[in-house]
Amino acid sequence: MQSDFTSRRRAATPRAMTIAVAAALCAMLAGCAVGPDYKRPTTDIPASYKEAAEGWKVAQPSDQQDRGAWWTIYNDPQLNALEDKLNASNQTIAQFAAAYRQARALVAEARSAYFPVVTLNGSGERQQSPARSGGFVTGTGSVGSSGAITNSFRLSADATWEPDLWGQVSRTVAAEKAGQQGAAADLANARLSAQGTLAQTYFTLRSLDAQQKLLDDTVVSFEKSLQLTQNRYAQGVAARSDVIQAQTQLQSAQAAAIDNGVARAQNEHAIAVLIGEPASTFSLAPAPLDATPPDVPAQLPSALLERRPDIASAERKAAAANEQIGVAIAAYFPTLTLSASGGFESSVFSQLLTAPSRFWTVGPQLAATLFDFGLRSAQTDAARATYDQNVAAYRQTVLAAFQDVEDNLASLRILGNEIVIQQQAVQSAQQALDIVTNQYKSGTVDFLTVLTAQTTAFTAEQKLATIAGQRMVSSVGLVKALGGGWDVAQIDRENGGMAAPAPATPASAPQAAADAAPVAGTTAAARAGAATKNVQPVAQKPATPDGTRND
């Protein structure tokens, strides 16, 4: 007895060692991933912005904190409320949020390939064989003129597992993970784009309100001018043509005031769509624009790669395409499938779950493609071309981002200089109008001179209101071009929800209201600087993905 036990143990020892070595080999091979490891594509980054105004403040380390609600820098409660509605109800954001959740599910789907697939099967059959001459009785059925009738019952479990020998699964998971991060960046970019569009549309509408006030004031002024010419005509000191000219000018101003309402209504309707409300039920009370662009601290150009979600999205797409090259190369190597099955099978149901009815099978299967007439080579070439395409798209996105920043910097700088000159032009035109009006009253000039001065003054004021609105739109464009309040460190924190990432201090909090309140004894410029100091969208030094694979 002892001898038999010893011999069985000696025979089992090599088998156990073989199994252990095979398992270790599979584990070692599972960590091998063919194909190129990803490195972020290189891009040419300027040392500074060409269009940056002299003395433009660079973001300091103390400024590096979450700036989610970037629109609060404008200290406009109405805008804050609209942005909150947009973050909760904008349907474009909802679409990208759903796409992000889909990408997140694809990651889980890809990771499931790391594990075996286990299935459970049960079946029962009753079968009659063809009739034979003669008959006899068996234990499982009977044979007679109608043939034999047999029963078969089976209950089994099957398991199959394909070890990731060449990294095909890990590459697929990495590609889907990059796709998820790209979807998160797309969601952030859609949110930032909608937020920026809303702010720009809002300030455009407020600029139209300012122009409407100017037009209404101009109509009142022209009515007084018409009354003046009518009085002078009644006294016989003015010609009938003066009255007609004054009346024509008044009617033109009235028509312009009415026409301004078309543009305002369209902008109001656009805001309604952005915040997810029907245009027919939404309205904003008129409020002339009186805001000035706040100072925006600038991060270095290199930080733009971390601040803009569209750049992050393009970079993640390149990372995903790189992983697909490894997936294509893995198809050159054989696949190993380990399968096992076991269960019970019997012709008598009452004896199904008994020891004699047990069965099992286990064994590996190795498969390799010998000839595919260039299929795998073509798939690999296509994957490499797709990667090159995504790298080019990434670099183009970076170039477009720097252009976006430079465009808005130039716009702000030029409009800032222009508005100073235009303010002087308004003052000069008003002085000239006052002088000419007095001369007309004294009879030293004709009404045509007054008409020209009035038109010049009105045009100058209208131009000033337009420039003020354009400057606010450019200010929002600059914040948007710099990435708003987003940072690439948030790429793994997106949850696909409708709400934007909450800032450290909500805009509606009492403290925010206290920060926005003017301080007694301070100048307007100082108050604007104080209100801007703690809410600027600035560069952060994020803990970002370094571009390498994360299996």
Image (tube, grey):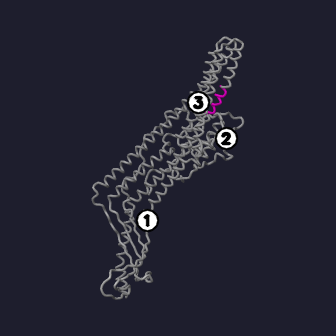
Q: Amino acid at mark 3?
A: Thr
Residue at 57 percent of width and 49 percent of height: 501
Q: Residues within 10 Å of mark 1 (few under 14, many from 20)?
A: few
* Label 2 element class: helix
Vertical placement of residue 241 versus 96, above or below: above
User: Earlier along the polypeptide chain: callout 1 or callout 2?
Assistant: 1
Q: Nearer the viewer, residue 25 or 354?
A: 354
Residue at 42 percent of width and 42 percent of height: 395
Vertical placement of residue 85 versus 424, above or below: below
- Tell me whether circle 3 and circle 1 mark residues in contact (CB < 8 Å): no
* Label 1 element class: loop
- Between marks 3 and 1 in the image, the one whose residue lies nearer the viewer: 3
Vertical placement of residue 413 versus 308, above or below: above
Q: Name the residue beneath numbered marker 3.
A: 466
Q: Amino acid at mark 1?
A: Phe
Is 403 situated left or right of 426 in this image?
Answer: left
Is 67 situated left or right of 151 in this image?
Answer: right
Dominant secondary structure of the magenta stretch?
A: helix
Q: Name the residue beneath numbered marker 2.
A: 516
Q: Nearer the viewer, residue 350 or 545?
A: 350
Q: Residues within 10 Å of mark 2 (few under 14, many from 20)?
A: many
Any mark on residue 115, and which? 1
User: Earlier along the polypeptide chain: callout 3 or callout 2?
Assistant: 3
Q: Amino acid at mark 2?
A: Ala
Distance, label 3 to label 1, CA atoms, is 64 Å
Magenta span of residues: 207-218
Q: Nearer the viewer, residue 149 or 352?
A: 149
Which image quadrant is residue 231 in?
Answer: top right
Distance, label 1 to label 2, CA atoms, is 56 Å
